[in-house]
Amino acid sequence: MGKLCGWSGKILFIYLSDKSIHVESTEEYLSFIGGRGINQWLLFNLLEKDVDALGPDNVIILGAGPMVGTLVPSASRLAVDYKNVITGGVGSGNCGGRFAAEMKYAGYDHIVITGKAAKPTYIYIEDDKVNFRDASDIWGRSTWETDYIIKSKEKDESISTLTIGVGGENLVKFASIIGDRGRAVGYGGSGAVMGSKNLKAIAIRGKKSSIRVAKPAEFMNRLRRFKRDVFEKSNVVRVHREGGTLGAYLLPGEKRPHGVRNMNEEFWSNDSIKNVTRDKFDKFLIRRHSCFNCPVYCSAIYKVRGVMCEGIQANSLRAFGTNVDVKCAEDILYAHALSNSYGLDCDQTSAAVAWAIECYEEGIIDKQDTDGLELRFGDGNCVARLIKKIAFREGFGDILARGVYEASKIIGRGSEELAVLVKKNSVMEAAMRSHKAWALGVVTSTKGTGHLRGAPAQEFQKVPPEISKELFNISDISNPTSYENKAALVVWHEKYKGIIDMMGICALPSMWMDVTLFIPEDIAGLLNDITGKDYSPEGLLNTGEKLQNLERSFNLLHAGFGRSDDMPPRKFTDIPVKEGIYKGEKLHIDKWNQMLDEYYELHGWDKATGWPTKKRLLSLRLDAVVDKLAKNRIILS
């Protein structure tokens, strides 16, 4: 095999149980290109149906796409895939930082970790050397401290790390892996999977390998034009360079739907918003910060009440601001800092806390249930105390640490009616009643909710009909409250998001946020210059569709998900928006079902079950998927 261009060419397999490793070639997996694509193909083939998500046979798969480590701006994303702790289906996350680039420079496109260490361990990878280190002395440390200690031990500040905090150690079901101190691998319990393996951290340093580019002159010319004529002219890049997603998100209350008070409302008043403007957070700012080779600089380092953190972005404002109705910037930032320090997913932590508060205010639970705590919306101290109890699984926190689905079953007493769930996962998103394509993308996400699969941000951007026709071949998507054409928009974005996740491109400076950024034609051109291959925009989108079908099949095999799991929570169908320009909006079940029918038809799936069809999988050359489903007595139509 000749040396690949774009790819490092190797997949590293690490077996914690006996501290052994082996290496395979990346080349045989290139039909899924890289990143999330190859990760998911490995995941599907490595895991048998009944594997326990917190057992030694679950895997953690890390992937860096072919654009990572090159000069392509914002191509620094690391794909992390595993079996989901909460849903039992696809576990999939993505983080920035430097880890993905260091992986490529160490010589690896993917790393697969399985088994369980006999004692707390961290892995240190330096090029072709894989070291298993005792982590007993850092077990119990925060993610920030762990990063610092490992760099000190290995005497190299340039090391990149993936760590877990006490949340992952204590197997909180929504614990997250944290990359480079502040980049969370959200949704699915990735931190708990690491904790179940006694794996405190993965550290990496690449010194020997470099990424070959097949056509360097053509690549540099294309890259210069792209950066000059597209990237640097983007308003999205400009706005996020000034203040990240937080600065872009804080629009006046009447213009921006939110998730408020355990998703009961979507309107947050201007009086509330004025208390959490960016300047309020900037009081705690140390410096702006960026991922590897990213000119956007959307992140920052903060220190609040003695706790260091990276962020804060729009998600954490929703999580620890609007959804719990806390209107103090310091309280919001502190809750965010605690969650990252403990290695907890902000969205799922917020959902558990907000659900508990609503249960308390509705009289379903009282101080006897909450260890004497009075739970109230708007109380930042209450939120912080619950976060700590969740991370350490203390008392009532142990119930919440199981996730809202299990917690509501334990509490009972009607608390289930207040849970906002899809596929057992909590929904903590804005605009779920008003923006129909956004809602469809969130609910049908293969991750078990979340906006980073098919949910299209174009509904917030009022894209003109002539532009949507040119880019998506869809006549009009400008009205967010309309159901028309929305299934097609979601399907297109599922494919597109698959492409950028396979490349390693960040979603923020992409078509997801700005229709001029990283269009498929630009991605194909850059990829061909890097790899020397001949990818077309249509071929890339088809590979994105192939990935979507693979993940849908994994969910069917491991979790049994189908049409009934693609239905929205009751709160979004029964409780309309109460104020603002979207007043009265909610999801109508009959129109939702029509939209869902169209969504299935566009994918070529069975409308009655929501399952992929045999014909569709075979057309995508997923014969092995059909065979594995049949082996497990799942016969497709």
Image (cartoon, grey):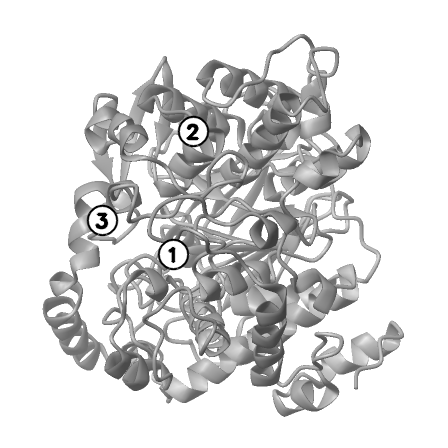
CA–CA distance in space, label 1 to label 3: 28 Å
CA–CA distance in space, label 1 to label 2: 32 Å
| Residue assigned mark 2 | 336
Residue sitting at x 28%, y 85%: 470
CA–CA distance in space, label 2 to label 3: 19 Å
Residue 8 versus residue 483: which sits nearer the camera?
Answer: 483
Which of pointers 1 and 2 lies earlier in the amino acid sequence?
1
Residue 325, given in percent of the width and then of the height, sits at 44, 28
The amino acid marked with disc number 2 is His
Front position among marks 1 and 3: 3
Query: In the displayed structure, does residue 309 sit left or right of residue 279?
Result: right
The amino acid marked with disc number 3 is His
Q: Secondary structure at mark 1?
A: helix
The amino acid marked with disc number 1 is Tyr
| Residue assigned mark 3 | 240
Which of pointers 1 and 3 lies earlier in the amino acid sequence?
1
| Residue assigned mark 1 | 105
On screen, 107 above or below 113?
Answer: below
Residue sitting at x 23%, y 71%: 516
Query: In the displayed structure, does residue 509 sit left or right of residue 127?
Result: left
Residue 450 versus residue 141: which sits nearer the camera?
Answer: 450
